[in-house]
Amino acid sequence: MKKSTKAEHHYEAVKKKSKLGSGARFKAVEAAAKASGAKNPAAVAAMAGRKAHSAKAMAKYSKMGKSK
């Protein structure tokens, strides 16, 4: 069984509070990936988002975040 890290707990808290497109969830996933030793945590977060939402939706969320 895998131990939960502080970064993963932070992601769960952010997930409940933040809206899609704000970038907060992406940053939380990126932090969790970095804490687990990923070489490129931004790529891990992007891939997880694409798997969960689709590439088209991720592009939409990115656009929403950039327009703020």
Image (tube, grey):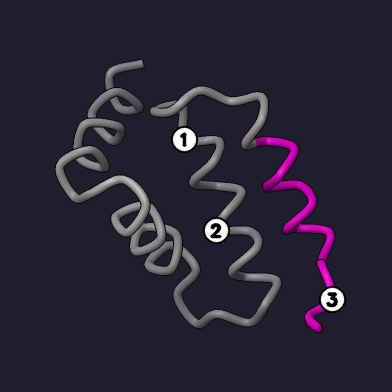
**x and y percentages locating residue 57 in the rendered image:** 23, 38
Disc 2 marks which amino acid? Glu
Q: Which residue is mark 3?
A: 3
Q: Nearer the viewer, residue 57 or 30?
A: 57
Magenta segment includes 16: no
Q: Nearer the viewer, residue 25 or 68?
A: 25
Residue placed at 45% from the left, 75% from the top? 40
Q: Farthest residue in the front direction?
A: 1
Q: Which residue is mark 2?
A: 30
**x and y percentages locating residue 28 in the rendered image:** 61, 48
Measured in 3D between alpha carbons, the distance from the residue under mark 3 to the one under mark 2, in whole angstroms, is 18 Å
Left/right of residue 44 with respect to residue 27 in the rendered view: left
Residue placed at 55% from the left, 47% from the top? 27
Residue placed at 49% from the left, 68% from the top? 41
Q: Quadrant of residue 61?
A: top left
Q: Which residue is mark 1?
A: 23
Measured in 3D between alpha carbons, the distance from the residue under mark 1 to the one under mark 2, in whole angstroms, is 10 Å
